Image: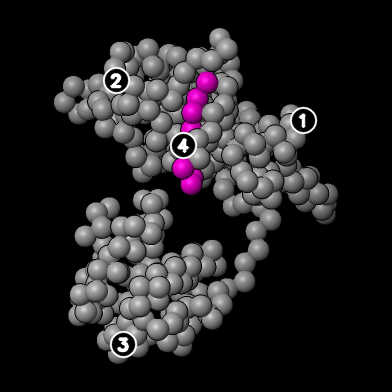
Amino acid sequence: MLISSSPALNIPIVTDAPPHARERFLTFFAAAIRNPNTRRAYAKASADFLTWCAMHGVRDLAAITPIHVAGWIEELSATLSAPTVKQRLAAIRHLFDWLVTGQVVPHNPAASVRGPAHSVRTGRTPVLEAEEARALIDAIDLTSPTGLRDRALIGLMVYTFARVGAALAMRREDVFVQGRRLWVRLHEKGGKRHAMPCHHLLEEYLSAYIETLGPGPAKTPLFRTLSRTTRRLGNTPLTQPDAFAMVRRRAKTAGIATNIGNHTFRATGITTYLKNGGTLENAAAMASHASTRTTQIYDRRRDDITLAEVERVRL
């Protein structure tokens, strides 16, 4: 998303502000936030909040008070999930912290506002059984370059626990040989680089896919879209919406009814690893989690216990 096209910049509260305030507002999205997904989410939250303020008679950034933020949060809580509301409140807090340090406003009106209570012990991401994941991969038609690409991408997310964003950010040079085995280098959140050896099946999937790409510059994207004119894989990187559509299409072909998404394979890989005797500490290291508490959210072994207990109710 281009910074100049942010919807928050077209709100009268911003456009009518003094030049230094507008510039400080712009640099928040340009300089304070490096992750494009976070930037997009924060821009949307800022636009929604400032539009809400304008609808309630606020015409100046300095006139926004904790009452306005609390009222907005109250309305959001009626229609959105608690994590979404908390994310949007975090965006407004971060924005006004930036404006305070830039001497645009005297205080942060979101600092004292509490978000909705929310505690996460188990993730909500749909998880596939090992047999389902195997069936999905086996159902992929490998006679086309896109089939080889899709198998390699899904296999990468399953066997390395990679986020889809880290997988799609990979370049050709991020698949390399070390110690006679194929390794992958993932670009995780916060600029972290995470290298892992490939499972023998993943090595097979990646090698077959890269062979179809042929020789090319090391910096070109690894996972690419199909050119409509040449019907070959071009140099345009595959996007997350493209990957989501592909995953849904492949699941439908395999006859899988679970409503899966890109993140399903990260959770599937971690759960399967733990079911087969892997440790939580090693799973956290493989997933590049700073804490095992994060990894536990992806551990869905308790789902089997819950289902078994439910079946004890016999009438």
Task: Give me the C-alpha separation between circle 1 and circle 4.
Answer: 27 Å
Q: Which residue is mark 4?
A: 187
Q: Residues within 10 Å of mark 3 (few under 14, many from 20)?
A: some
Give residue 198's quadrant in the image. top right
Q: Which residue is mark 3?
A: 58
Task: Give me the C-alpha separation between circle 3 and circle 1.
Answer: 58 Å
Q: Over which residues does the magenta segment extend?
A: 183-191
User: Picture coordinates of residue 52 (x, y %)?
Assistant: 34, 80
The question of residue 280 being in magenta is answered with: no
Q: Residues within 10 Å of mark 4 (few under 14, many from 20)?
A: many
Q: Which residue is mark 2?
A: 217
Residue type indicated by callout 1: Gly
Q: Which residue is mark 1?
A: 277
From the viewer's side, name the closer residue of 153 and 279: 279
Whether residue 70 is visible, yes or no, is: yes
Of the 4 image quadrants, the one containing the C terminus is: bottom right
SS class of the residue under badge 4?
Answer: strand
Of badges 3 and 1, nearer the viewer stands 3
Q: Earlier in the sequence, mark 1 or mark 2?
A: 2
Q: Earlier in the sequence, mark 2 or mark 4?
A: 4
Q: Residues within 10 Å of mark 1 (few under 14, many from 20)?
A: few
Q: How is the image coloured?
A: one colour
Badges 3 and 2: C-beta atoms under 8 Å apart?
Answer: no
Which residue is located at x 40 percent, y 73 percent? Answer: 101
Task: Give me the C-alpha separation between circle 3 and circle 2.
Answer: 53 Å
Q: Earlier in the sequence, mark 3 or mark 1?
A: 3
